[in-house]
């Protein structure tokens, strides 16, 4: 008899962390602003989040996708974009240290995030939009 193993999604992994929190924002609300301290990772449970860079380029994140991890992991500790709720959204929020600990304990999460970025770049190439 075959056993079926399912892999937890990044948001499911985030939500299981003791320090994670679920936050909700109505349409049009700022989630964070450019220059603000980047101290948390966000995963979209429901809705659409639009992330806008300084040049005005926009990316939308939908249910199942994580955003802001680039700022937390690779940048100088500040958000380089604005994030706005384009629809009512429900997000899972996990602070920086807990996220890095989660990556340490679940290294396959990094592979999933690289896959998400790969798909995003393919979409941008197909649509002719710029990556930022």
Image (cartoon, helix red, strand yellow):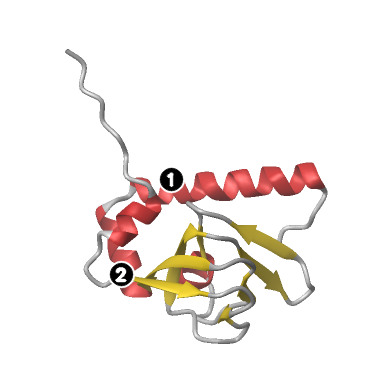
| Badge 1 vs badge 2, beta-carbon distance below 8 Å | no
- Residue 103 makes an appearance in the image: no
Which residue is rendered at x = 32% and y = 49% of the image? Answer: 107
* Residue 2 percent coordinates (x, y): 21, 16
- Say which of 54 and 64 sits in front: 64
* Residue 113 to residue 25: above or below: above
Residue 94 in sight here? yes
Q: Residue at x 33, y 60 (%)?
A: 14
- Nearer to us in this view, 86 or 51: 86
Marks 1 and 2, how far apart in space?
A: 21 Å
Q: Residues within 10 Å of mark 2 (few under 14, many from 20)?
A: some
The answer to whether residue 119 is above or below residue 46 is: above
Q: Name the disc covering residue 40, or none.
A: none
- Secondary structure of the residue carrying numbered label 2: loop
The N terminus, quarter of image: top left
Can you tell which of label 1 and label 2 is closer to the viewer?
A: 2
Q: Label 1, on which residue?
A: 111
Whole-percent x, y for residue 86 in the image: 64, 68
């Amino acid at each position: 008899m075959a056993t079926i193993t399912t892999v937890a999604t990044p948001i499911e992994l985030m939500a299981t962390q003791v320090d994670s929190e679920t936050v909700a924002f109505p349409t049009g609300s700022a989630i964070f602003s450019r220059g603000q301290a980047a101290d948390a990772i966000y995963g979209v449970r429901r809705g659409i989040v639009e992330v806008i860079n300084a040049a005005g380029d926009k990316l939308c994140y939908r249910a199942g996708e994580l955003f802001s991890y680039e700022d937390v992991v690779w940048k100088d500790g500040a958000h380089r974009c604005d994030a706005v709720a384009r629809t009512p959204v429900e997000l899972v929020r996990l602070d920086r240290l807990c996220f890095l600990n989660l990556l340490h304990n679940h290294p396959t999460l990094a592979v999933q995030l690289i896959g998400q970025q790969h798909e995003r770049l393919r979409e941008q190439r197909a649509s002719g939009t710029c990556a930022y």
